[in-house]
Amino acid sequence: MSGLNTLTIADARDKLRSKEISAVELTEACNAAVAGSDALKAYSVKTPEMALEQAKAADARLGQGDAPDLCGIPLGIKDLFCTKGVESQAASNILAGFKPEYESTVTTKLWDSGAVMLGKLNMDEFAMGSSNETSAYGAAVNPWRRQGSDAALTPGGSSGGSAAAVSGDLCLAATGTDTGGSIRQPAAFTGIVGVKPTYGRVSRWGIIAFASSLDQAGPMTKTVRDSAIFLNAIAGHDAKDSTSADMAVPDFEAALTGDIRGRKIGLPKEYRLDGMPAEIEKLWADGADMLRDAGAEIVDVSLPHTKYALPAYYVLAPAEASSNLARYDGVRYGHRAKLQKGEGIHEMYARTRAEGFGPEVQRRVMIGAYVLSAGFYDAYYRRAQRVRTLIKKDFEDVYASGVDAILTPATPSAAFGLGEMADADPVKMYLNDVFTVTVNLAGLPGVSVPTGLDSQGLPLGLQLIGKPWEEADMLNTAYALEQSAGFVSKADKWW
């Protein structure tokens, strides 16, 4: 049966339960799509045999009436998630050939739900990047192209492979991780939905760490409803993760009524950047009008410390990365450099890390070591932590005033071309995160919803920022925005 790979989770769930299709048929369709998608470089590892075995088991559960929402649903898994016996190397040469002997909590929950793994997905090395160009596998490619052009575009990063796979119908949904926008930015670039939950809502255990106080796993899906279904499956307390919140998980899908009458939505004036493209301004204004027409009250709000978010983030994230990546030394697992005659352990450390880490990871590790050093800790790291506290208080003040959610652009532009930023100052690339990093610094939930196309036919997204632990309310507002926008465009298949 052709075209099954284009289904949403919700539609596939209904067809599986009604026996209209089988999990094996659905998985075979996705396996075929994956096999013919090498031009997108979305998958770093394909697991078609494993997928079919999981699909057979899912069909057995469906036949017995034991069918969780994700039972039989084929998924792609970002390479940052450890999957037992399957290569998990964070798109880095330093972890080449690493096959964990354990499963991350998120993927354990997915397999317990009966989900199917099609393979591991490409990403920026150790999740450091905004374009998927730092990957040891090579850059993933956006399924979308500019009108009249064959130029390859970035799917965003770091979850670029996940975004490309979902947008290109190479899976029904995918896992992503978001440290400074790495779910929401690629979702916006590829015309899909991406959710970054409240910090602590989803376990980080078994996810290869970048910046531990900022990282959060979440779903990347074709619709808001699919994200709600997915989030229900992976959220919850995990005793193995000390940062996991012991809080009840609501039924996110049940919250999707689309009724947002009386909700108060804030528009932060600090997000109106100098030089913002007119298309982004219009998209934002149109999104506000859609929510107003749905019954919400639109108010202007102020987040005064927003301008300090990027500098603070690019002190704190590299600092945590330098500590987390210190474990990759060539001693216990992963790549180990060959030593020259007379070289010792220190040379082995240095040579291993120089060979194993790419330029962007090396840059961030060095920045992190610098800001944590004795002479600069107070000047940079401690000051950045104070700024982070002020940014968090900005959001608290806005929500305390009665605002229910905040609407902003998801990205400052549509997807740019692969290689276009190769010679740019790294700071210019970091500006891709200008609308998203505040959410991570404050530990808040955020969602990117596709709402329009730019003049070149590329997708654009809007971001909703919710109150902590109120993903259900945020997703309902996102659902109302999705319904109003009516975004149904797909990339023309060229791969």
Image: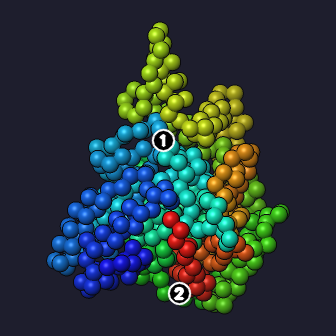
Residue 380 in view, yes or no: yes
Q: Which mark is residue 92?
A: 1
Q: Quadrant of residue 202?
A: bottom left
Q: Is residue 294 above or below residue 133?
A: below
In the current view of this chain or complex, which residue is farthest to the right?
Answer: 274
Residue 238 in view, yes or no: no
Residue nearest the viewer, comparing 299 with 327: 327
In the current view of this chain or complex, which residue is farthest to the top?
Answer: 342
Q: Residue at x 45, y 62 (%)?
A: 37
x then y, percent, for residue 234 = 38, 64
Q: Residue at x 83, y 63 (%)?
A: 274
Q: Is residue 170 above or below residue 433?
A: below
Q: Amino acid at mark 2?
A: Gly
Query: In the drawing, does residue 467 fall left or right of residue 431?
Result: left
x then y, percent, for residue 487 = 58, 81
Q: Quadrant of the N terminus?
A: bottom left
Tag in front: 1 or 2: 1
Q: Which mark is residue 258?
A: 2
x then y, percent, for residue 226 = 44, 75
Query: In the drawing, does residue 305 fall left or right of residue 204?
Result: right
Q: How is the image coloured?
A: rainbow
